């Protein structure tokens, strides 16, 4: 008699397929980032630009066609829609410059977040091992300051780390896909 029921086998097979496909896609995107970092960044920028145009059309449509919204809400939706559309069009006009701008913005954003994270870690010194919290806070603050002074360089390093992480995690998920649901012997 079969020890594992059919619905359970189906669920395990579904999870294995999801892990495998997700792992393969992750590894492919990671390799693309590592092999063509600039082109991949421009593709990501193009996806964001498409989103901006589509979101702009939705906002403008809400403002134009919504009967339940008041006058100022409709004007606000139309104005926001126009701004999104303009941003998307400008991004499409020069994807490489927009990609660099986004990279610098993200570098600055991560830098500020790491500084704040380090300060927060210092504020929680009484809640756990002090040595690790201080070490973490110092590293976080130094990394954040480094990114603030060189956000473009920091974004490039973060992009490479993302690519490496995607390849490694993708390969791990492919291995998990082959081993998931099998009993340890």
Image (cartoon, rainbow, N blue to C red):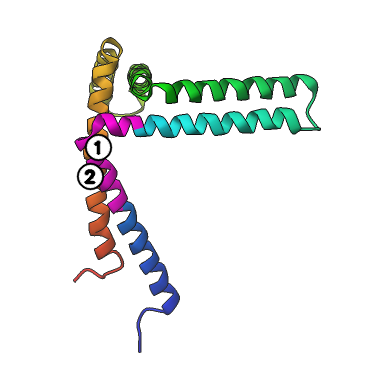
Name the residue rendered at 54%, 30% in the picture: 53
Q: Is residue 56 visible?
A: yes
Q: Residues within 10 Å of mark 2 (few under 14, many from 20)?
A: many
When the figure is inspected, residue 36 is found, relative to residue 172, above or below; the finding is above
Name the residue rendered at 80%, 32% in the picture: 68
Which is more toward the observer, 172 or 142? 172
Circles 2, 1 touching at the beta carbon (< 8 Å): yes
Label 1 belongs to which residue? 163
Residue 114, percent from left and from top? 33, 21
Residue 105, percent from left and from top? 38, 18
Name the residue rendered at 26%, 49% in the picture: 170
Query: What is the span of residues highlighted in magenta in the rendered image?
Result: 23-42
Q: Is residue 136 visible?
A: no
Label 2 belongs to which residue? 167
Which is more toward the observer, 167 or 180? 167
When the figure is inspected, residue 19 is found, relative to residue 118, above or below; the finding is below
Q: CA distance from mark 2 to mark 1?
A: 6 Å
């Amino acid at each position: 008699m079969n020890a594992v029921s059919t619905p359970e086998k189906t669920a395990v097979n579904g999870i294995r397929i999801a892990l495998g496909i997700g792992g393969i896609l992750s590894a492919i995107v990671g390799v693309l980032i590592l092999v063509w970092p600039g082109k991949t960044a421009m593709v990501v920028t193009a996806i964001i630009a498409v989103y901006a145009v589509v979101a702009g059309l939705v906002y403008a449509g809400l403002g134009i066609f919504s009967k339940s919204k008041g006058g100022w809400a409709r004007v606000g939706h139309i104005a926001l829609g126009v701004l999104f559309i303009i941003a998307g069009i400008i991004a499409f006009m020069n994807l490489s410059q927009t990609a660099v701008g986004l990279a610098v913005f993200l570098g600055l954003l991560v830098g500020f977040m790491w500084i704040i994270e380090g300060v927060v870690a210092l504020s929680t010194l009484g809640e756990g091992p002090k040595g690790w919290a201080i070490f973490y806070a110092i590293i976080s603050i130094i990394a954040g300051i480094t990114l603030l002074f060189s956000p473009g360089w920091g974004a490039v390093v973060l992009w490479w780390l993302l690519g490496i992480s995607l390849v490694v995690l993708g390969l791990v998920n492919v291995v998990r896909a082959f081993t998931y649901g099998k009993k340890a012997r």
